[in-house]
Amino acid sequence: MIRTLLECEKVRAVISIGCCYNLLSEEGFANARIQYGFPMSCGVKSVNLSLGKSSRDLACQSAERWKSLGKDAGLHNFELHAFRAAFQMVLHKYFPEVGISPSIGRQGKALRRKQQRKIIKSELQAEESTYSDLPQMACNMEEACSVTHSGESEAGNTSGVRSDVDALFTKMSLHTGSTCERTMSTYKYSLFEKFCQSGLCRLGLKPSDDINFHGIWKEVEPFVSLIGIYWSLRAAFGPLLETLILLDRLLFLQEQGDVLESVMLPIFDPAISPRNVAIIAKKPDAGISSHHSSR
């Protein structure tokens, strides 16, 4: 679009808003061609700066939108990254003929929506269960409070009661916690297997009974908790990389001299539209007023 402004006489102005940086062609990372999406400017070309696919992927991050995500939704995002990584291991081990970076579409979103609906339903059920269990919990507490040492009760010492109550709740907590952990682990494995089945179908691959989904998931599961930390650190570089790509485009326009007037401005709320920066350029005789134009 930016080059069209220079190459086509009829185009007098352009407003360019970045998108899909991961799909940019890059010099040295694609088939030989006359023009590349990055770098465009002579200035960036002169320093031999390259990004690579991983960096261009990071430039697409929407860090501002993370604020609007609840805790559960944020954790689900990280779980999907774990699913993708484990699925890559499935392909590497059982389908080595598949390319290094196959595309299976954005099935993660559909899976995440299903998860969220299940979570809402389970939370409502848990809330109802909690209220229905209150009488039983009260009986348990009463039973614990009645188990005291005779000497302590006669002396008015309540430390024994407190200890017994604490012991009861600790036992209940440990039992409930271990059960929940096992249930959650089984649930996540079930989601992972569905993710893999869907991914294989999208790639036109027939799932085999020989695939040990459970073994691969058990290998990945201990590292799932680290993905959020690692991904957050990587994503912090996203705005920097996007700015680099945008400045390269702006510099390309400025290098054209007096034939163009150009400016780069934030025009959207990044929480609503992560790609919120526009590069506005026009030819001096375009008849469009601009109070912010600069070269």
Image (cartoon, grey):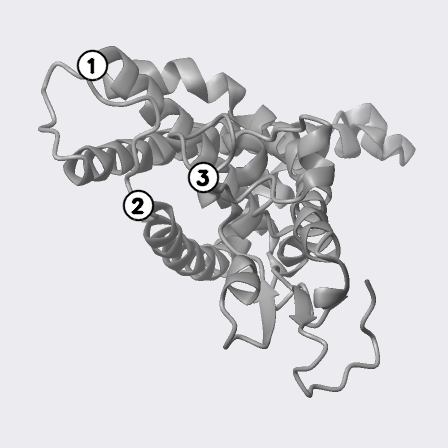
Q: Position of residue 292 (x, y in %)?
A: 83, 75
Q: Does residue 236 show up?
A: no
Element carrying mark 2 = loop
Q: Residue at x 33, y 53 (%)?
A: 110
Q: Nearer the viewer, residue 182 or 104?
A: 104
| Residue behind mark 3 | 34
Q: Residues within 10 Å of mark 1 (few under 14, many from 20)?
A: some
Q: What is the CA distance from the residue labelled 3 to the residue labelled 2?
A: 30 Å
Vertical side of 89 occupied by 26: above or below? below
For marks 1 and 2 on the same chain, the one whose residue lies earlier in the sequence: 1
With 142 as the anchor, is 255 left or right in this view? right
With 269 as the anchor, is 118 left or right in this view? left
Q: Position of residue 175 (x, y in %)?
A: 51, 28
Foreground: disc 3 or disc 1: 3
Q: Nearer the viewer, residue 205 or 294?
A: 294
Q: What is the CA distance from the residue labelled 3 to the residue labelled 1?
A: 39 Å
Foreground: disc 3 or disc 2: 3
| Residue behind mark 1 | 94
Q: Nearer the viewer, residue 240 or 87?
A: 240
